[in-house]
């Protein structure tokens, strides 16, 4: 089976176009504030709390 240069360039173009479309921007994510905030939340003051990452074995 021989591949002609023209056919190779067609496949290369389709692959490049597919990759470009697949890397487009997704949905826009927005931060939505509380409608009714908890009592311990004070505007302008940082709220620190402990979290744990379970994605790796280092935790």
Image: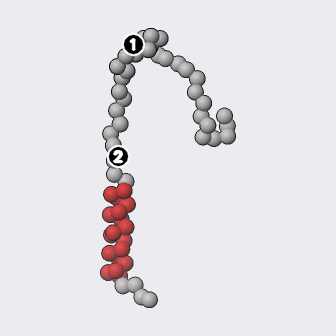
| Labels in figure, total | 2
Reply above or below: 36 against 24.
above
Q: Secondary structure at mark 2?
A: loop
Which residue lies under the disc numbered 1? 43
Disc with the residue nearer the chain's start (2 vs 1): 2
Q: Which mark is residue 26?
A: 2
Q: Residue at x 36, y 29 (%)?
A: 31
Q: Is residue 53 visible?
A: yes
Q: Is residue 45 visible?
A: no
Q: Alpha-carbon neighbours of circle 1 within 10 Å: few (<14), some, or many (≥20)?
A: few
Question: Outermost residue, bottom direction?
Answer: 1
Reply above or below: 31 against 14.
above
The percent coordinates of residue 32 (x first, y second) are 35, 27
Q: Which mark is residue 5?
A: none
Q: Residue at x 60, y 30 (%)?
A: 52
Q: Secondary structure at mark 1?
A: loop
Q: Quadrant of residue 28?
A: top left
Reply above or below: 33 against 28.
above
Q: Alpha-carbon neighbours of circle 2 within 10 Å: few (<14), some, or many (≥20)?
A: few
Reply above or below: 28 against 4.
above
Q: Residue at x 37, y 21 (%)?
A: 34
Question: Outermost residue, front direction?
Answer: 36
The percent coordinates of residue 54 (x first, y second) are 61, 37
Pick the front one: 33 or 18: 33
The percent coordinates of residue 57 (x first, y second) are 67, 40
The percent coordinates of residue 40 (x first, y second) are 47, 11
Q: Quadrant of residue 35?
A: top left
Cα distance between the residues tagged 2 and 1: 31 Å
């Amino acid at each position: 089976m021989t591949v002609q240069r023209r056919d190779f360039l067609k496949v290369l173009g389709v692959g490049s176009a597919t990759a470009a479309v697949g890397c487009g921007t997704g949905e826009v994510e927005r931060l939505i504030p509380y409608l009714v905030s908890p009592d311990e939340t004070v505007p302008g003051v940082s709220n620190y709390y402990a979290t744990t990452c379970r994605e790796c074995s280092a935790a």
